[in-house]
Image (cartoon, rainbow, N blue to C red):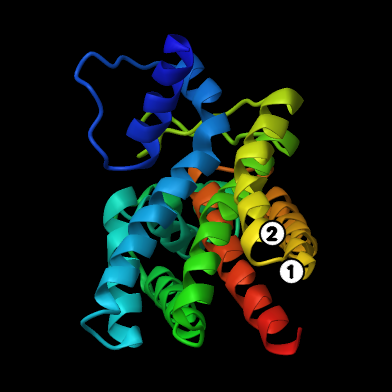
Amino acid sequence: MKKQLHIFLNALMFYSRIPVPSWMHHNEEMLNRATVYFPVIGWIVAGISGLVYWLCTWIFPPSVAVLLSMGAGILTTGAFHEDGLADVCDGFGGGWTKIKILDIMKDSRVGTYGVVGLLLALLLKYATLTTLDIRHTLLALIIAHPLSRLTALSMIYTHEYVREDALSKVKPIGKKISLSELLLAGFWAFLPFVFIQLYWPNWAILGVVLPLCITKWYLARYFTKWIGGYTGDCLGSIQQISEIVIYLYLIAIWKFI
């Protein structure tokens, strides 16, 4: 139990800005093992975002509550995944060779492609969440944050990490994961569905797996074509895009079913 707590705290330290005990130590092996708790970090982000949203709806209009909720989620992760999405937009938008793409993604500056891509992603999140009522917004957050992280995590299992040189601004990520670890991460990601089905039964929600599989397949194919695998920025972009895909799917089923 103590060892698993240590591993979880490693995940908390790497994937969020939440403080951890000073006695924590880390290494690459520990980080690889900590990836199984990536969806649990999604729970935490969803919980903080949902709580801020719910509290703000008592004072502000839903649109303002959504913006403040989004801000709380970004602060919790330190814009970790948003930064990855911006870097991917810059790299693949401005680079035409593997070396050039990786060089652009290493640059700490954000270019036009990154700004436009990130802005569109944030606007899509805002637009989708503001169309939902309070209950459905909270459900969407609980579903999207863990599941989008599992989608990104599956890339680690199925594809190869593209190693960058020592001068790059490498984000700490797990680069290895076994099938058993992927299944355990899947358990954490799908656990919220159990509670949702108990209180608000709607089996159509599980259909979100199909668009997520398509999204992951397409992005994985695209990244492999251009750079031969993935980087930490690629994982961040998968998480962000998957989160948006989940919101769009949930809006569709809650509107027509």
Horizontally, is 221 left or right of 19 in the view? right
- Residue 117: x %, y % from top left: 46, 73
Q: Nearer the viewer, residue 23 or 100?
A: 23
Q: Residue at x 34, y 49 (%)?
A: 77
Quarter placement of the C terminus? bottom right
How many residues crowd around disc 2 within 10 Å: few (fewer than 14), some, or many (20 or more)? few
- Residue 66: x %, y % from top left: 35, 77
Label 1 or label 2, whichever comes before in sequence order: 2
Q: Amino acid at mark 1?
A: Asn
* Image vertical order of residue 140 relative to residue 238, above or below: below
**Disc 1 element:** loop
Horizontally, is 257 left or right of 232 in the view? right
Q: Residue at x 45, y 42 (%)?
A: 41
Residue tagged by mark 1?
Answer: 202
* Number of numbered markers: 2
- Residue 125: x %, y % from top left: 47, 75
Say which mark, if any, is on residue 46. Answer: none
Q: Nearer the viewer, residue 165 or 21?
A: 21
**Disc 2 element:** helix
Q: Amino acid at mark 2?
A: Gln
* Residue at the extreme front: 199
Q: Would residue 59 be visible to someone looking at this image? A: yes
Q: Residue at x 41, y 74 (%)?
A: 122
Residue tagged by mark 2?
Answer: 197
How many residues crowd around disc 1 within 10 Å: few (fewer than 14), some, or many (20 or more)? some
C-alpha separation, residue under disc 1 versus residue under disc 2: 6 Å
Q: Would residue 94 be visible to someone looking at this image? A: no
Horizontally, is 31 left or right of 180 in the view? left
